[in-house]
Amino acid sequence: MKYSHYLVPLCLLFSTYCYSQHYQIEDTYRGDPFFRKIDMNKLEKDCTYPPNYWQLSGSKQEKIQKLCPLNNLKFDFRGLYKFIYKAPVILYNGQDFQLTLGMFKNIQDNQNIQDNQDNQNIQDNQDNDIESGSTIFGGDIFLSIVKDSIVKDQIYLANNSIYFSDVAVGFQRYFISQEGEVYTLYLQEDDIGISPMLWKHYKIDNQKMKFVLQDMLISITDGVQYQIIYPNQFNVISNKPVTKIEPKELKSCEDEYNKEEFYDCYLDVYNHYNSRLKQKINLLNKNNNIIKKSYLKLQQKITSDCLMLPPPVSGDEAFDPYLSHITFCLIQNYKQEITNIEKQLAH
């Protein structure tokens, strides 16, 4: 019996060892570990050009560009295309499934991914900016989970260039860890520098054969980030002070909801109702000594329901509508809970 104290931790140790999965992927395909964790504000600051950038000499511009860590990555994203543009590459070949890297979107196609001719035909139908030869300019890259030659799940992993206009271009980078974590960062570049827009963190579920989105960072407003941690956290990270919204401005902003566009004032409206909900819950708990209402649990329940909306895909210019829908959902639920608490306080 005296050895029983050691059996549980020993069993847990071997259980963890048996069920943990490591993905031994060649460095040629893994991506850059820089994207594992991102400080959006610092990255944007480091990658923004000074106002006089375009008046500087070429050598001085080059020095400024080196200050941006994105220009000093060790992983050759451009060179990656020469390994995968003809056919998908198997990154990981496990007992139950494979991880493949390829330049085609094939989530519903059950063709054998190792059939090079079929894959070439699929690729030829893509609008990828590729020159088959010594130079490859870019194109969409997808990471897939494949079992018995069938694509079970797939995520958009990278692209070297997504053109929006003559002055703006988007691109995405990634990293795949040995623990089965996948990180992507979508960026936009224009004449004032490079701006990080959307960071995602996935985990490979090897039982369900799915890429499970764990958390996101969205940055479309200067000094403000929206952090989403699944299944039930929505956080606003801002270096700006919280401002009180006036009644007229509150009504004016709420009137814009149906236009499906994101307005800066949505954040003020969100903060307004979030603060009011906290106040009402505190007041209710003060008046009721028997049953205490938890703001945190209520907020997490509301957020969980609102996060059922599908997340934006990098490069599809859906960040504004997505944030509009999420904040609208949160605000409407906050308002309803405030009304419910006010009814309880009235009795």
Image: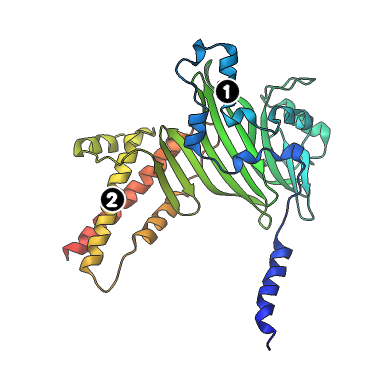
Disc 2 from disc 1: Cα separation: 42 Å
Q: Is residue 319 above or below residue 328?
A: above
| Three-letter amino acid code at the position of disc 1 | Gln
| Depth check, front residue: 216 or 328 | 216
What colouring style does the render use? rainbow
Q: Residue at x 65, y 41 (%)?
A: 33
Q: Residue 304 occupies which quadrant of the picture? A: bottom left
Lateral position of residue 295 relative to residue 167, left or right: left
Viewed as shown, does residue 264 lie left or right of 343?
A: right
> Residue beneath label 1, please?
65
Which label's residue is closer to the chain start, 2 or 1? 1
Residue at the (55%, 30%) spot, across then down: 187
Secondary structure at badge 1 equals helix
Tell me residue 314's x, y (percent).
55, 34
**Which residue type carries mark 2?**
Ser
Name the residue located 24 percent from the left edge and 63 percent from the top edge. Answer: 284
**Residue at the bottom extreme?**
1
Q: Quadrant of the C terminus?
A: bottom left
Q: Confirm whether residue 104 shows in the render.
A: yes
Residue at numbered disc 2: 275
- Residue 317 seen: no
336, above or below 169, in the image: below
Q: Are marks 2 and 1 in contact (CB under 8 Å)?
A: no
Percent coordinates x, y for residue 182 in the rendering: 63, 45
Q: Residues within 10 Å of mark 1 (few under 14, many from 20)?
A: some
Q: Nearer the viewer, residue 318 or 287?
A: 287
Q: Nearer the viewer, residue 241 or 265?
A: 241
The image shows a total of numbered marks equal to 2
Tell me the SS state at disc 2. helix
Image position, residue 213 (x, y; %): 57, 48
- Write the residue at 49% across / 50% down: 229
